[in-house]
Image (tube, rainbow, N blue to C red):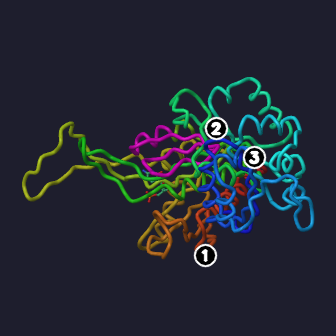
Amino acid sequence: MFAGKKILVGICGGIAAYKICELVRELQRQGARIRTMLTPAATRFISPLTFASLTSAPAAVDLFAPSADDIEHIELAKWPDMIIITPATATTIAKCAHGLADNIVTATVLATRKPVMFIPAMNTGMWENPATANNVMRLHDFGYRVVEPEFGAMATRIEGAGAGRLPETETIISHVFQYQWPDKILDGVPLTITAGRTVEKIDPVRFISNHSTGRMGFAIANVAAAMGARVKLVHGPTHLRPPANVETFSVESARDMFEFTREHYPENGILIAAAAVADYRPLHYSCSKIKKQKDEFALPLIKNPDILLELKKLKNKSIHIGFALETNDVLANAAAKLSKKNLDFIVINNPVDEGAGFAFKTNKVKMLFPGGKILDFPLKDKLEVAAEILQNATRLLINKRATE
Ligand code: C5P
């Protein structure tokens, strides 16, 4: 996700400082090169040695320490592709909002010309204080990105009291990923995605479902948000955390997924159906647990609405993209779906390809277009597959808008 990217992480003196170790590790796992710097207060919470060990590079703490070729904060300011300040405390935010440069972190922020993202975490009272709110506004005005802290459990144990919690590592990664995305080709475009599996209840303890994890759809949502789209993600049960800057709707059954997707249909935008929707549901739901009976047991099923087929009726200026997961007659089956559902293209995954399909972080796809054109891709990270899908969708949307 961050292959070759140089990221400088500035750690401030908040209790969430310990969580930044995991963030640094995760950024490294995703290919980033990391250097760190700590405010004096941060060193009271966590040792610079921890970060030096994790990154195999010195953690900068001293504003006055000379480096080999430059003054340290000037050298640090030039080195990265981007800077992350986290947990950004009220004090560091206030200093940066007023151009103060009294430690290695604030001095580097003042000196740099690189993109800077603040990820605050603090006590709710401090976050909601008008002084902090005002300073955050100043940071926005200066062109910095400030991520909203979350609601939830905090070290001060005023659970549910308000915002101030550091977002989970996965969410921070999604913010960083979107921030460093170079082109906003979908700026303001409405885009709705279905993702994951559906669950069709049989009785209070049993259901019909499938192995879909939602990874492909969530990756598309993440990249679409990075490209600037207004993303709505309608998803079934999953352990995945929603990407940043995406409006999510968590559903269970195919019928609920259909209702939400229809309600949030992307007029003049892009609809992507990546969900593995159950084709059938039990004809009757049993309110009590079905007891074991004879050796054979038949469960009558009834067809679910086909979301793409139903939403074809609404299609006017929007682009519709479907997925096909086939085990045999792959191309013929995909072509039949493409035309029946009036799609602009269909993404074909083959579940027998190594590293492709459910649960994997990678996927190997083909895209089939009306008229028979096929784009065949090698095994790629799902985020890269998502980017290919979205670039093709954008091209088609631009063409469609141009021909009106
Ligand atoms: O016809 P089939 O289910 O194989 O088509 C797969 C495509 O149709 C996928 O894009 C899937 O998300 C979508 N689909 C749907 N509603 C259903 C079943 C599938 O939108 N009930």
Q: Which residue is mark 2?
A: 149
Q: Earlier in the sequence, mark 2 or mark 3?
A: 3
Q: Earlier in the sequence, mark 3 or mark 1?
A: 3
**Where residue 301 sits in the image (x, y, percent)?**
26, 49
270 or 403, which is in the foreground? 270
Q: Amino acid at mark 1?
A: Pro
**Where is the N terminus found, in terms of image quarters?**
bottom right
Whole-Å distance between the Cαs marked 2 and 3?
A: 23 Å
Q: Which residue is mark 3?
A: 40
Q: Secondary structure at mark 3?
A: loop
Q: Is residue 357 left or right of residue 139?
A: left
The residues colored magenta run 231-260
Residue 76, numbered label: none
Whole-Å distance between the Cαs marked 3 and 1?
A: 48 Å
Work out whether 168 lies above or below 97.
below
Work out whether 364 lies above or below 256.
below
Whole-Å distance between the Cαs marked 2 and 1?
A: 38 Å
Q: Earlier in the sequence, mark 2 or mark 1?
A: 2
**Where residue 149 sits in the image (x, y, percent)?**
64, 37
Q: Secondary structure at mark 1?
A: loop
Q: Secondary structure at mark 2?
A: loop
Instruction: Name the residue at 72% across, 43% down.
Output: 41
**Where residue 285 sits in the image (x, y, percent)?**
24, 40
Looking at the rendering, which quadrant does residue 119 occupy? top right
Instruction: Name the residue at 44% across, 74% down.
Output: 352
Looking at the rendering, which quadrant does residue 161 occupy? top right
Q: Which residue is mark 1?
A: 378
Of circles 2 and 1, the one toward us is 2
**Where residue 158 sits in the image (x, y, percent)?**
52, 29
Would residue 309 be counted in the magenta stretch?
no
Q: Residue furthest left?
A: 294
Work out whether 338 lies above or below 225.
below
